Image (cartoon, grey):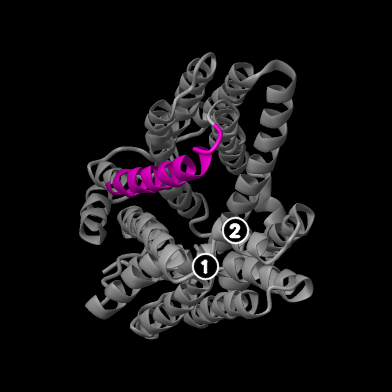
Amino acid sequence: MPSEERSPSTSSRRGLDWINLLSADIQSGVGPYLTVFLTAHGWSAGWMGMALAASAGAAAICQLPAGWLVDHTRHKRALVIGSGILIGMACLVTAFWPTFMPVILAQGALGAASSVLAPSIAAITLGLVGPRAMAGRTSRNEMLNHTGSVLTAIVAGVCGQKLGLRWIFYMTCVAAVGSALASSAIRPQEIDHDMASGGEAGERRLPMGQLLTRPVILMFLGAVLLFQCGNGAMLSLASRQLAVTHPGTETWLLTACILGAQTAMALVAWAVGRALAQGWGRKAVLIVALLAVPLRGVLFAWATDGEINAATIMGIQTLDGLATGALSVVSTVMAADLTRGTGRFNITLACVALTIAGGSALSNLIGGATMQTFGAPVAFLALSAIAILGLFFALGMPETRPDDGDQDSMDSARQAA
């Protein structure tokens, strides 16, 4: 059997399932409920901004070192366990000591741990199933992750309403313990650590300078950057416009949009896995994801050029589920394709995460400034135009699906999914 064909045990596969389901909770920590909790404890908007910035800044700073660490260590299960526990501890600190310095330090720890958790899960996945089954397994991972996000939002809402916001932090700690237990179900001897980094036994890792100057890598990152630059600010701009025209409805609408989008993402992740198993190319899926962004922007521009209503926004927001759900699967799969034999899979994923973060920041800056100067419809059209530029990057890329053993690859993808 070729070294890249893998057949992990049922225990390892189920352990990976539970990690992905629970990591939807522990990666996001307490999510949007943090601001509500801190407001109840007298925090000003400026202090809350510093807390959120501490988490985002720590995640950005740690992305590349985390990717390098995951590529080089053989203790990937320990990284998942440690990250989950650190996030749980950060949530407990926030719950029991909601004062400035403890919360800032806790949020910084949460951001750093989150930057390690995602590449660790991706590396374990690749090391368990191998490149041929990576597409199907990644689809399953993302489907479970988005399903977990939906369940988390529902449980968090009930806990916050019935028991108090502090219970949301306790719930995150339970998820952290659950992820640790799930990690123990993965058999370490079944993880091929060379394969988990995108390399092969006995081969040297490709120097980072050579990796990041490959035209196809630059085009891939450019497409992801422009996708997120067009997509990132659309929901916040629509919510802001609704808050102006229909004050008092934005909170429940935002919750409904998040739940709807996460549900759509779960369904799309499953559908993308099936499409890849049936022979669809990665490039085609990336193009479909990019096409959904300008369509969403044009519809938002139409909806905000007049009396905007909640039902319209919720309907249009389902396109975010299509776009983001497809990208979450195909970006990981394409990163695995592009780094085969380099030993740089996880640090490339870190570059993708940094690109997405940068795209989100640019999206909010461009969208906010354009909306303030020219109005909401023009802002949405401007973001749509940016996403169309990303489409040109995607069209210029070659198909990344390996040519060798296509039928075997499809069979493996079906089995993993």
Q: What type of secondary structure mainly makes up the magenta span?
A: helix
| Residue 227 visible in the current orientation | no
Residue pictured at 50% horizontal, 51% vertical? 335
Q: Position of residue 329 (x, y in %)?
A: 41, 49
**Real-space Cα separation, disc 2 to disc 1, in angstroms:** 8 Å
The answer to whether residue 351 is left or right of residue 148 is right
Residues tagged 2 and 1 counted as in contact (Cβ below 8 A):
yes
Query: In this view of the protein, which residue sits in the foreground, 100 or 174?
Result: 100
Identity, as a three-letter code, of the amino acid under mark 1: Leu
Question: Residue 234 sits in which quadrant?
Answer: top right
Q: Position of residue 195 (x, y in %)?
A: 45, 68
- The answer to which quarter of the image holds residue 364 is top right
The magenta stretch is: 247-270
- The tag on residue 300 is none
**If you read the primary sequence from the N terminus, does the residue marked by circle 2 or circle 1 appear first?**
2
250 vs 376, left or right, is left
Examine the structure image and report whether residue 263 is included in the region drawn in magenta: yes
Q: Position of residue 66 (x, y in %)?
A: 63, 68
| Rendering quarter of residue 371 | top right
Quarter holding the N terminus? bottom left
Name the residue: 39% across, 71% down.
Answer: 19
Residue, disc 1 = 165
Q: Quadrant of the C terminus?
A: bottom left
Crowding near the residue tagged with mark 1, few <14, some 14–19, many ≥20 C-alpha atoms within 10 Å: many
Please, what is the three-letter code of the amino acid marked with disc 2?
Answer: Val
Visible residue check, residue 381: yes
Secondary structure type for disc 2: helix
Tag shown at residue 36: 2
Badge 1 marks a residue whose secondary structure is loop
Instruction: Please tell me which residue is depicted at 43% across the width and 41% down the height of the picture.
Output: 257
